[in-house]
């Protein structure tokens, strides 16, 4: 039994979709099916019930899954530890994250990862700027993996050539930051329709148009245009990249409202400002991103751990 066969089984058991499993494994859908058939022949029975529309585990598959997940994790951990010993090095992984995601949640993931894979050590750093624009989220001096916000309810908004976008790790409702005395601040939540007629700060004009439109759509669902300002937040602050604090000061100075996440002020208090949840926009999600060329065991193991650890700091 090959480790690759078991890994393919576990990924398909997680996704229950051959296409998504193939994307995660960076192989073709046909190769996924081939590896599963090989494993089923070796075990002696079907592990999945597959139709043209659904994939689900059989009772035999569920039984194999329970043991395979524990065994695969132990083998991967042992392999990593032995590789580190053989090379007399501690495998190091650098992880960056947007501070508004929450340092406590990210620390929880990193701690779980280092506990699960003691052969790895993580260098964790908050990313000062939020530039995920025309040059992409990565530059050569940046980290191995970054945890970033992606608007639109999935990771498509931050896709870029040479970049792999991992699975969605967390969903957060959208919100708009307004001065405390603003009429919208009186509401517990609002529809995106209520943003019409209010000037909205542009996060960064360097971002691809698709990303800008996912962050703030050109129109409301009913077709009313939204007033996204021509000058972006970095230009207002005399910078080239987006800094969250600059967005807050721009709102405080009356330049416009900032469409972001409903938790934006939970971790960074700013007297005189309030965040109003928007109940009918697709959520902002947290996704891991990394250079496709850098895919390795450390990155894959970190992403698997991140999928297993809750972002809810109250858990």
Image (cartoon, helix red, strand yellow):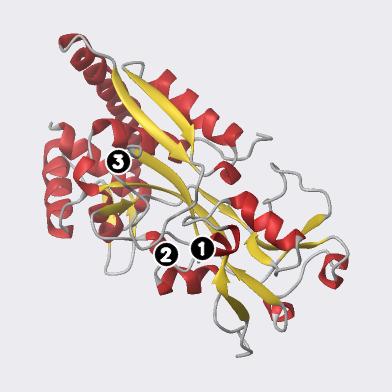
Q: Which mark is residue 151?
A: 1
Which residue was labeled with disc 3?
10
Check whether the beta carbons of the residues at disc 1 and disc 3 lie within 8 A of each other. no
Check whether the beta carbons of the residues at disc 1 and disc 2 lie within 8 A of each other. yes
77 vs 89, nearest the viewer: 89
For the residue carrying disc 3, how many other residues have a C-alpha within 10 Å: few (<14), some (14-19), or many (20+)? some
Q: Indicate the position of residue 104 as horizontal and vertical percent values.
A: 60, 32
Vertical relation: 200 (above or below) 225: above
Q: Indicate the position of residue 239 as horizontal and vertical percent values.
A: 51, 55
Mark toward the start of the polypeptide (3 vs 2): 3
Which residue was labeled with disc 2?
157
171 vs 72, nearest the viewer: 171
- 302 sits left or right of 21 in the view: right
148 vs 71, nearest the viewer: 148
Image quarter of the N terminus: top left
Q: Indicate the position of residue 182 as horizontal and vertical percent values.
A: 84, 68
**Which residue appears at 36% of the width and 40% of the height?**
145
Image quarter of the C terminus: top right
- Pick out the residue farthest to the bottom: 223
Q: Indicate the position of residue 91 as horizontal and vertical percent values.
A: 28, 20
Mark toward the start of the polypeptide (1 vs 2): 1
Label 3 sits on a secondary structure element that is: helix
**Which residue appears at 76% of the width and 59% of the height?**
252
**Which residue appears at 37% of the width and 37% of the height?**
304
């Amino acid at each position: 039994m090959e480790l690759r066969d078991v890994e393919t089984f576990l990924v398909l058991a997680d996704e229950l979709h051959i296409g998504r499993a193939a994307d995660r494994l960076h192989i073709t859908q046909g190769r996924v099916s081939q590896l599963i058939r090989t494993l089923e022949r070796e075990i002696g029975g079907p592990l999945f019930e597959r139709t043209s529309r659904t994939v689900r585990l059989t009772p035999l598959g569920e039984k194999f899954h329970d043991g395979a997940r524990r065994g695969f994790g132990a083998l991967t951990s042992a392999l990593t530890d032995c590789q580190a010993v053989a090379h007399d090095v501690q495998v190091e992984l650098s992880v960056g994250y947007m501070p508004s995601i929450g340092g406590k949640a990210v620390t929880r993931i990193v701690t779980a990862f280092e506990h699960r894979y003691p052969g790895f050590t993580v260098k964790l750093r908050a990313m000062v700027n939020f530039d995920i624009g025309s040059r992409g989220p990565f530059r050569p001096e940046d980290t191995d993996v970054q945890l970033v916000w992606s608007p639109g309810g999935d990771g498509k908004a931050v896709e870029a050539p040479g970049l792999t976008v991992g699975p969605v790790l967390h969903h957060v409702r959208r919100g708009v930051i307004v001065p405390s005395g603003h009429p919208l601040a009186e509401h517990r939540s609002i529809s995106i329709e209520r943003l019409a007629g209010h000037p909205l700060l542009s996060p960064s004009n360097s971002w691809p148009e698709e990303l800008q439109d996912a962050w703030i759509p050109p129109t409301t669902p009913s077709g009313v245009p939204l007033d996204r300002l021509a000058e972006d937040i970095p230009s207002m602050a005399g910078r080239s990249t987006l800094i969250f604090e600059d967005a807050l000061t721009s709102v405080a100075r009356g330049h416009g409202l900032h469409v972001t996440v409903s938790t934006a002020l939970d971790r960074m208090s700013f007297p005189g400002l309030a965040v109003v949840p928007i109940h009918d926009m697709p959520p902002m999600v947290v996704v891991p991103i990394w250079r496709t060329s850098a895919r390795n065991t450390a990155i894959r193991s970190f992403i698997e751990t991140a999928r297993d650890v809750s972002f809810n700091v109250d858990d």
